[in-house]
Image (tube, grey):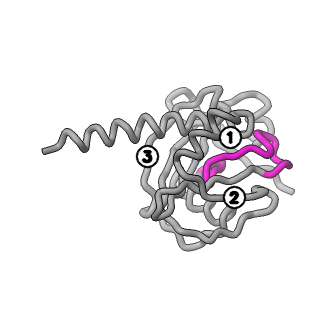
Amino acid sequence: MKEDIFDVVNDRDEVIGQEKRSLVHKKGLKHRAVHILIFNSSGELFLQKRSMSKDVSPGCWDSSCCGHVDSGETYEAAAVRELDEELGLKNVQASELALLFKINAREQTGEEFVHVHRLEHEGPFELHPREIDEGRWFTIAEVNRLIVEKPEEVAASFRHIWKKYKNHSSRKDAKAQRKP
């Protein structure tokens, strides 16, 4: 099986080269990833439980959909591709994804620059068995409780993203309340 090639980036998320996936992770090189948070009309968040065969955070709960940006690919194209590959969503357009925020590469993200998107969708999903062991809808309270009570069952990158998401949402709500 051919190994994925990623763009290696500098501290400003500018491409400085390409490298095989295994070497990017082994050397701790900065690279790019996407995470998509999928909410249904009831406000529940779909989380995936990563396959036990994954090299990072096996068996842990994670964002609805996530993956690396391949060399030469945009963040948006990677998000659309990952939705298809992981969840079987074949007709999602990049315009349906709302960019919530960006995270700079750091230890908590595995040295990945991350674009976090939001998607409204009701499912159902076709979970890719090599990527995902299971998936289910969680209320916001359940997500918060899972992270506090069982942090070892949640991928470190998602814990970091969720903390930023909660801060982002509370600032957005406060701003909306100040508008006349």
Of callouts 2 and 3, the N-terminal one: 3
Give residue 23's position: percent from left, percent from top: 79, 35
Q: Which mark is residue 18?
A: 1
Res. 31 visible in picture: no
Q: Is residue 141 magenta?
A: no
Q: State the CA–CA distance, disc 1 to disc 3.
A: 27 Å
Magenta stretch: dominant secondary structure: loop
Span of residues in magenta: 51-72
Q: Describe the element under mark 1 as helix, strand or loop.
A: strand
Q: Earlier in the sequence, mark 2 or mark 1?
A: 1
Q: Front-most of 88 and 105?
A: 88
Residue matched to label 2 = 135
* Residue 71 belongs to the span the image colors magenta: yes
Q: Residue furthest left?
A: 180
Amino acid type indicated by mark 2: Gly
Q: Residues within 10 Å of mark 2 (few under 14, many from 20)?
A: some
Decide: marks 2, 3 in contact (CB < 8 A)?
Answer: no
Residue drawn at (50%, 62%) of the image: 40
Along the line of sight, which residue is nearer the eye, 131 or 147? 147
Q: CA distance from mark 2 to mark 3?
A: 22 Å
> Residue 178's image quarter?
top left
Residue to which mark 3 is pinned: 100
Q: Which of these two is toward me, 93 or 128?
A: 128
Looking at the rendered structure, the kind of residue marked 3 is Leu
Q: Quadrant of residue 157?
A: top right
- The residue mark sitting in front, 1 or 3, is 3
Residue 156 location (% of width, % of height): 67, 34
Residue sitting at x 49%, y 51%: 117
Rendering coords of residue 142 (x, y %): 59, 46
Cβ–Cβ under 8 Å for marks 2 and 1:
no
Q: Is residue 5 above or below residue 38?
A: above
